[in-house]
Amino acid sequence: MFQKYTKEFRYNLKLSFPVILGMLGHTFVAFADNIMVGQLGTAELAAVSLGNSFIFIAMSLGIGFSTAITPLVAEADGAGNKANGKNALKHGLVLCTALGLSLFGLILLSKPLMYMMDQPPEVVDLAMPYLNLVAFSLVPLIVFQAFKQFSEGLSQTRYPMYATIIANVLNIFLNYLFIFGSFGFPKLGIVGAAIGTLTSRIVMVAYIWILLKRKKKFQDYVTGLNFAKIEKRVLKKIIALGFPSAMQMFFEVAIFTAAIWLSGVLGKNAQAANQIALNLSSMTFMVGTGLGVAAMIRVGNQKGLQNFHELRRIAQSIFFLALLFEVVFASLFLIFRYWLPTVYLDVGDVANHADNMEVIALAAQLLLVSAFFQISDGMQVVVLGSLRGLQDVKIPTFITFIAYWIIGFPISFYLGLHTSLESTGIWIGLLAGLTASAIMLYIRFNYMTKRLIVGG
């Protein structure tokens, strides 16, 4: 019975593994920043957490919007229509560049909100200069996403991975130079981390553009892009897919961001613990995200071929694979929940010993809850990827809003700020929202694929 699903595992992994590494790369930038900044103290770590909370919201809109390019390119590839694939890239680049610049401007305008959010004043003062530079790095990041989604739509998932790995190595090297003032460079603290992030993202865009231009398989798509000729029809199609996809990612990222803000109300140690647990959860989530991209590509291909029986079987094989991964991650979080937080802090720092011990204890409690939502989080993102491959985005957007903001957030708010559970209560709300999302999205997928099979 399971063989019809397990026989797809090899190709699913081949397709998703580079995506997983690439997505981990985005998270690893934050991971490297957190570990290196964590050596400076818990206030600095909380400041990076607060600054990145604004960035993550904007990033979710940009990355979510750019995912519209993948199913369009995958469908065109399945149907053998290169002109449509090229059109999706060109118009996607235009829209992603405009969106990146807009998000940069919005973050600058929203900076005064930090003073109105009841956050520790020392944390806000540290976060402000960090935010300026990291906000600008959204422009090259979202342009990179357009190239990445295009490449993945053609089932070429390795090239964005190469770009991300190079960017990460560069980011860590620049962090070392500028955070700590190594080799005679100025010691800039968390601003140094922001310089590393911005520079590495600019290099990432330049690298993938040069790589795509040189590869023969992309020649028909990336040469002769006439940006003077923009078609409203194609723009509308990408926006119709991209806007709901952006909102889906926004609703999920925003509830995790709300968890950062709620934790900030509880104090800098609660916020630092939240950041550690969130960063670790983000890394395991990227495995689900990578499998979700594989689902989007393969479902998009089968949609182009109009083979709906295969479409359903292939999607379910990815769901099964994701479930196996998430059970492993849940087990690791349960077993190592007290050790993992120690990676982020200088345990031997005598001056900050009490704070560090409190942060480790709090983070271990959050990782206990996180272990349980690994399965829900992984399943909802792969099912969502399959629905994007079907170009079904409007109802799933409504589902994610209900799951996170009608179910999840009220639970987080009440348990976090009005009961003794505090930080743990915030994360119980996250668990409830993710579980509701996974169940409702699977019901939608089941309905859509059965309807296509009967209709086809």
Image (cartoon, grey):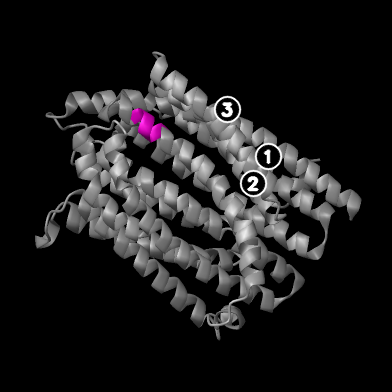
Q: What residue type is labelled 2?
A: Leu
Q: What element carries label 1?
A: helix
* Residues at marks 1 and 3 touching, judged by CB atoms closer than 8 Å: no
Indicate which disc, 1 or 3, sits on the residue closer to the N terminus.
Answer: 3
Question: Outermost residue, left direction?
Answer: 184
- How packed is label 2: few (under 14 Cα within 10 Å), some, or many (20 or more)? many
- Residue to which mark 1 is pinned: 441
Judged left or right of residue 408, residue 413 is left
Asked whether 177 falls inside the magenta stretch, the response is no
Over which residues does the magenta segment extend? 259-263
Question: Outermost residue, bottom direction?
Answer: 224
Distance, label 2 to label 3, CA atoms, is 18 Å
Q: Nearer the viewer, residue 369 or 11?
A: 369
- Residue to which mark 2 is pinned: 384
Q: Position of residue 222 (x, y in %)?
A: 55, 80
- Which corner quadrant of the image does residue 271 belong to? top left
Q: What residue type is labelled 3?
A: Ile
Q: Position of residue 228 (x, y in %)?
A: 53, 82
What label sits on residue 407 in the rendered view? 3
Q: Where is residue 92 in the image (x, y as percent from the top left)?
A: 56, 68
